[in-house]
Image (cartoon, grey):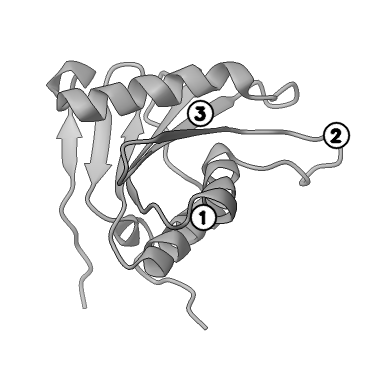
């Protein structure tokens, strides 16, 4: 058997659509709220909801490792609690340092897929560096062998 999927790669953020570029900028703006004194790896996330509203999240570390939380889960748990009647259409992730594209961890991939399933529509995911981005049209493509009860 073979697993493959389609994705888009942009060598420059300027190649993104204006909406996607704006969402990456929103994710980058969330970096200032990251609390990462231990790893010094700040992550920001931004989601555009169907209504056009933008939500933000940033990673939060704790001295009691692994009690911290990634930016993606901070954002999606807030969305589920306060905005789940307004589906997530696009989701951008950025980091500082920004030398490489910021891909979500396994837990975040599962939570993104859970959100997609709950809302019944795909979530476009933009994983950005300071210069480039990779985009998938569904979080499901990031986790092919998913956990499902």
Label 3 SS: strand
Q: Which mark is residue 106?
A: 1
Instruction: Name the element at disc 2.
Output: loop
Does residue 30 appear to the left or right of 93 in the view shown? Answer: right
Residue that appears at 17% across and 26% down = 16
- Find the distance from the CA under tag 1 to the CA under tag 3: 17 Å
Q: Residues within 10 Å of mark 2 (few under 14, many from 20)?
A: few
For marks 2 and 1, the one nearer the N-term is 2
Relative to 73, does residue 117 appear above or below in the rendering?
A: below
N-terminal of the two: label 1 or label 3? 3
Sequence-wise, which precedes: disc 3 or disc 2?
Answer: 3
Q: Is residue 75 above or below residue 61?
A: below
Task: Identify the residue under disc 2.
Answer: 63
Q: Farthest bottom residue?
A: 149
Residue 59 falls in image quadrant: top right
**In x, y percent, where is residue 20?**
24, 30
Q: Can you give x and y, in whole percent of width and height, for residue 100 in the image?
A: 39, 25
Residue 58 found in image quarter: top right
- Nearer the observer, 37 or 120: 120
The answer to whether residue 119 is left or right of residue 10 is right
Q: Residue at x 69, y 33 (%)?
A: 60
Q: Residue furthest right?
A: 64
Q: Where in the figure is residue 86, as x and y percent of width and height?
A: 39, 52
Crowding near the residue tagged with mark 3, few <14, some 14–19, many ≥20 C-alpha atoms within 10 Å? many
Label disc, if present, on residue 44 of the rendered structure: 3
Badge 1, how many Cα within 10 Å: few under 14, some, many 20+?
few
């Amino acid at each position: 058997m073979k697993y493959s999927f389609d994705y888009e790669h942009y060598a420059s953020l300027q190649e993104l659509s204006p909406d996607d570029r704006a969402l990456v900028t929103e994710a980058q703006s969330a970096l200032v709220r990251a609390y990462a004194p231990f790893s010094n790896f700040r992550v920001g996330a931004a989601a555009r909801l169907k209504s056009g509203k933008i939500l933000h999240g940033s990673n939060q570390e704790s001295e009691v490792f692994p009690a911290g939380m990634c930016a993606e889960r901070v954002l999606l748990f807030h969305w589920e609690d306060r905005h789940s009647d307004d589906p997530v259409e696009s989701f951008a992730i950025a980091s500082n340092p920004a030398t490489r594209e910021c891909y979500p961890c396994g837990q975040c991939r599962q939570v993104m897929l859970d959100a997609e399933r709950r809302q019944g529509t795909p979530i476009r995911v933009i994983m950005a560096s300071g210069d480039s981005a990779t985009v998938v049209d569904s979080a499901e493509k990031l986790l092919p062998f998913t956990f499902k009860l």
